[in-house]
Amino acid sequence: MSVITQDIVQPGPATRTRGYWAGVLRRLVRDPVSVACAIVLLLIVLAAILAPWLGLHDPYQGSMIRRLRPIGTPGYPLGTDELGRDMLSRLVYGGRLTLYIGLLPVGLAFLIGTSLGIIAGYVGGLVNQAIMRTIDVFYAFPSVLLAVAISGALGAGIFNSLLSLTIVFIPPIVRVAESVTTSVRSLDFVDAARASGAGQLTIMRVHVLGNVLGPIFVYATSLISVCMILAAGLSFLGLGTKPPEPEWGLMLNTLRTAIYINPWVAALPGVMIFVVSICFNLLSDGLRSAMDVRS
Amino acid sequence: MSEAEVLAPVSDIGGPAQPLLQVQNLSKHFTVSGGLFARKSVVRAVDDVSLSVDKGEVVGIVGESGCGKSTTARLIIGLIETDEGTILFDGETVGSAISLRELRRRVQMVFQDSYASLNPRLTIEDTIAFGPKVHGVDPEKAREHARDLLRRVGLDPAVFAARYPHELSGGQRQRVNIARALALSPRLVILDEAVSALDKSVEAQVLNLLIDLKEQFGLTYIFISHDLNVIRFISDRIVVMYLGEVVETGPVEALWDRPRHPYTQALFAAMPSLDPDHRTQKPPIAGDPPNPIDPPSGCRFHTRCAFAEPVCSSTVPKLAPTGVALHLAACHMVDPNSGHSLAGSRGPGS
């Protein structure tokens, strides 16, 4: 009767299973692409934070006589821009502002969008209709157009571009949060929790939140790169950061006049945007598969 | 409420003769909107269902998928609001004498899908301890209680307590679900297709476990299944449902010896025989169940019944005694005065 008793046979030694997030981290570390992306991002973030202590040139200090030096100039390893300012220093300092306006709107939109989406998905009915139809109104506009329109209406400036980007990213996050919550809510374990007499808030906290935050978080991570590109676009159009502030999008804009004279230097801010956004994208892909419990 | 009270079984009120659960004229109609301009239609998922469950009894509910078995279960435990009807638990009316929250401590449910009914982010121990914690039991004590229950359902807590649902087999997960259902010391457990998704060997183990636990904890079961062999094995009494209505009910032997409703007969005939000389040659019942949005008039089974006569489509048959104690059937052929030509005769079941 070995078949019958199989179910009771103990599967291996009594090992304490690790927590869920420890498992996610363990799987993430095993993926070389994710690790490489994380290291690159970490270096860029560290450089941005530690910029004043790196012994770089003053990013605002220009010079008429050393404008548009090529890459590899002694003392200016990445050359100089159209006003003779050190490119390396400006890229490092620019990272501060660019990362700031790339991460903050997504973070804010994540908080607001997740709350709205979970409420819409969990409560359902008229509340769902009210939230989701309002979101649909914002969804009707292309994100770039919406960001430009809101920024334009509010006027140029860092705060206004942060605000407009946050508004742009709330609708897609609400949508994802709502659909994930709706599907989790219909699972039997939520019914089982209700059947055990738990209140709505307890069920939301214990049973819904833990199961929906993961997918929403992964989605939000993939939005960081979009946000950075949009922010760079706003700066390029003159709606975000103002010169002489170093910011990658703005630098790309001001250097475009030099593209025929010194194309490599002019392309550098673009390269930075590309590297950071692709790293965030690959990292969110890695996170997605690391969070799949069954992998 | 103190911790000891939550974890101890609720004391008996009505005495042994008082049915543990009485469901009277329970109805649930779902409104289905067919779109913006379509007329709204009503699905009569459960229509005027009455049943009673005695203390210590196992009542089996059988029927095709979509006949309202699960809806009935969810109505009893209050996961869906009832449209009409009353539920009495040990003689007390739910909603007035005892609250829904109180009822949920006394009635628990085990679901069919063992994976979907466990939170993938919680350890087995936390899942079982959740109910008691919600009712105010100290977390450490609730976990202790959970480990004890794991032992009772045949899972070693040292191995399983800290595991996650995906690390368990289907049979082990269903044992966890049973432990979770027992965590609040209920008196009635509704098993909604609880063993249907398991393979046969595991199914047998879980059924035996359920029988043992019933003895140990003094439980009463409502056992919902489409598997007649399982129902016959575990039940004392059977309720046969068709399109949201009870068509026949009675003690398991009486029903097996002589099913009176043509639908019950067809269900039994559909069971594959183990005897090679009695192979099923033709389908015992034709077609799909009619659409519950617009159920047939009169007897809902008349569209598929071999004995249907004009009276069947005009008059709704009531559950009537068949002559055997507690055995009732809703068929015109059972009632001698119904006007059916086979009424009162020995009928098709003999």
Image (cartoon, rainbow, N blue to C red):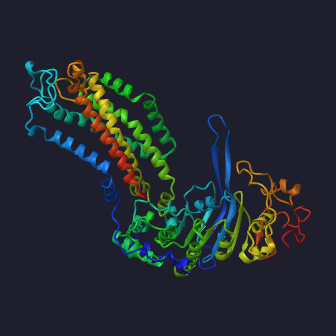
Q: Quadrant of residue A85?
A: top left
Residue A63, position in %: x, y?
A: 8, 21
Residue B219, position in %: x, y?
A: 56, 76
Q: Quadrant of the N terminus of chain A?
A: bottom right
Left-right relation of B50 to A252? right
Left-right relation of A280 to A83? right
Q: How many numbered circles does the render carry?
A: 0
Q: Residue at x 50, y 45 (%)?
A: A124
Residue B143, position in %: x, y?
A: 37, 71
Q: Quadrant of the C terminus of chain A?
A: bottom left
The answer to whether residue A64 is above or below residue B66 is above
Front-most of A36 and B91?
A36
Q: Residue at x 47, y 52 (%)?
A: A184
Q: Is residue B23 visible?
A: yes
Q: Is residue A122 visible?
A: no
The answer to whether residue B199 is above or below residue B78 is below
Front-most of B38 and A265?
A265
Front-most of B92 and A266?
A266
Left-right relation of A141 to A240? right
Q: Residue at x 35, y 49 (%)?
A: A287
Q: Quadrant of residue B49?
A: bottom right
Residue B42, position in %: x, y?
A: 67, 47
